[in-house]
Image (cartoon, rainbow, N blue to C red):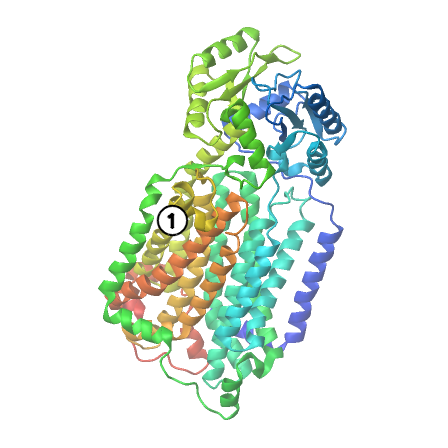
Amino acid sequence: MATFLYKLGRSAFRRRRLVALLWVALLAIAGVGAATAPAPTSGSFSIPGTEAQRAFDLLEERFPGAGADGATARVVFKAPDGQKVTDPAHKAVVEETVAALKSGSDQIVSVADPYTAHAVSQNGTTAYVSVAYKVNAMELTKETREALKQAGESAQGKGLTVEVGGDALQTMPETGAGEIVGVVIAGIVLVITFGSLVAAGLPLLTAIIGVGIGVSSIAALANVLDLGNTTSTLAMMIGLAVGIDYALFIVSRYRAELADGREKEEAAGRAVGTAGSAVVFAGLTVVIALVGLAVVNIPMLTKMGFAAAGTVVIAVLIALTLIPALLGFAGDKVVGRKQRKGLKDGLQKDEKPNGGTRWARFVIRRPVMVLLIGVLGLGAIALPASSLEMGLPDDGAKPISTTERRAYDTLSDGFGPGFNGPLLVVVDGDKAAADKAVSTIKGLEGWAAVTPPTPNKAGDAAMITVVPKDRPSSTETEGLVHDIREATGDDVLVTGATAMNIDFSQKMNDALVPYLALVVGLAFVLLTLVFRSVLVPLKAALGFLLSVVAALGAVVAVFQWGWLGSLFGVEQTGPIMSMMPIFMVGVVFGLAMDYEVFLVTRMREAYVHGERPGEAIVTGFRHSARVVVAAAVIMIAVFSGFIGMTDQMIKMIGFGLAVAVLFDAFVVRMAIVPAVLALLGHKAWWLPKWLDRILPNVDVEGEGLAASTGEGAGSGPKPDLVKA
């Protein structure tokens, strides 16, 4: 592989105008496709195989046009102290709002007048208008949401306090500001790392081009492939991350080759042949993690995973072709002034030990101490993960400054917390079956209200609304859902937003172990092929699991227990978002393997070329530590930018990913990895003879490349022949 990529890099360097033109043309074609394609009309959310989804399907069949799985909204009215919402003046304001809501959008199914729907609190101070929509929250138009907000705002200032809640207001948070901040920080880190504006600009430019092509292609194909408008979210985040990382690896190796005295075209070829090989396999591990999301069997997640995987493939191709082409345009400007002068004068690079060299030597001298501190430290941070409770945060987790949170609190005060998450019970049967279900539910604990059955026209199905005593995200409400399902039989199904969230959390929980097994198993095979070792991939996988569990422990401590919650803007503790573990595994695994492959392939390259195990570790750190640290700092900065957002879910994702990268890059890869390799010595590169014969030699370390270009591999031991 190294020889093929070497030739590809040299070819791209020589034909740089053609290569650059091709990528610009691809970006233009994708952009035109995105601009001319109709807006995505899908975005529907379904969870195949769950009771909540079966109930929605039954409702669509027996109650056509009712919008059973559609979005809902509640406009909550509260009268001033000493007054009631039933007072004539206040009643007129409420009825005016009801009329405005009915005429505000053609996506509305029904608007319930609180005075006829018994939606006035017992003390008369609070009332709410229920709004039901034909489509789910992701499919609501901007005009529909604006009409809802306008109706609430128009009622303000007329003697009543008015707040709007419900999932109809939920939109994908705008992340543009966070991405811009991340790009700016990335630029600063790259300038510090390279000491050259040109070298710093190349990774940013190519990452933006790659993300532009990927996201534009998703937009262009959205209708054809039935993609929702949220599909590109993960693709944008991952594409930007790996795009910068991969380009950073190639540019760094190119500068090192120049410092060794090689001509520019030769340096570009060698950079792509060696660092490019690491990029290919690092990219493959990310693709495995993203495509593996299909294991969860949730269509939205599967589409997001495949779309993001496509963007990663584009990032790899850009790193292997566009980067060497742009290096050809950059010339000597890709290095700093001091190094440029040294190149002109024919001076070799300064061999003064850098920070990576000094740190590697320290770890090699004290491997047991470093290993124990790293493992015990991460183990202690991981302890809270044993108390992990998964769910989906409701409006009660939003900041008090939002109207959704104020509507949530007002409803809780006036009617009880369970009114924020009513359960919809669907009976597949006649009136007698429905009445029996109501009687059974009333015999259970944990409910605050149970409505009479509402039959369909055919009389063969009915709907029952059950209001829990506790808030939607509580364990008591989850227990009530399970109790109803166990007590009522197969012909009675529980659904609604609260039950859907519970089923979603359970499905994510059930999928975690199979997903981990698939991703880690396939990556283990891939890394065995790359490193031609059994122990190095095993160490990589175990180290990754340790960093992810530690990151989950930190998330539980902050967002579930409330430790240091005020520091991170956590106003309400609660369950951890059910997507969090799988999301962290997929994203962090990809980034962790990037650092692992780039760092350890450089060590293996030195070992194959004749260095002793300890010397190879030092060489790997001398050449790679600075780049890995820079890449990790960029990712931590990008993810930390999301911690400041008001949305609890985005805040949690940003915090979780930032600490996971921090633990994995700085504790696992920079401390535990060299400590373990130092303790293993030659055994680290041991491969059974029978496995050595089976595995193809992909030559990631460039041994074949060295031979083809007339440079010996050195006199050191062949790692594949070293016995344990």
Instruction: Decide which of 96, 157 is in the foreground and name it.
Output: 157
- The residue sitting at the top extreme is 432
| Amino acid at dot 1 | Ala
Left or right: 162 as drawn, with respect to 652 = right
Name the quadrant containing residue 211: bottom right
Left or right: 173 as drawn, with respect to 666 = right
Q: Secondary structure at mark 1?
A: helix
Residue at position x 59%, y 82% in the image: 331
Split into 4 quadrants, where in the image is the C terminus?
A: bottom left
Name the quadrant containing residue 111: top right
Query: Looking at the image, can residue 5 be seen?
Result: no
Q: Position of residue 209 (x, y in %)?
A: 63, 63
Residue at position x 55%, y 75% in the image: 199
Q: Position of residue 648 (x, y in %)?
A: 51, 43
Number of numbered discs visible in the structure rendering: 1
Q: Position of residue 95 (x, y in %)?
A: 72, 23
Q: Position of residue 203 (x, y in %)?
A: 56, 68
Left or right: 166 as drawn, with respect to 548 = right
Query: Looking at the image, can residue 625 be seen?
Result: yes
What residue would you read off at disc 1? 554
Compared with residue 469, is residue 44 higher up or lower down, i.e. above or below?
Answer: below
Instruction: Decide which of 559, 46 is in the foreground and name it.
Output: 559
Compared with residue 271, is residue 515 higher up or lower down, i.e. above or below?
Answer: above
Left or right: 612 as drawn, with respect to 469 = left
Q: Residues within 10 Å of mark 1 (few under 14, many from 20)?
A: many
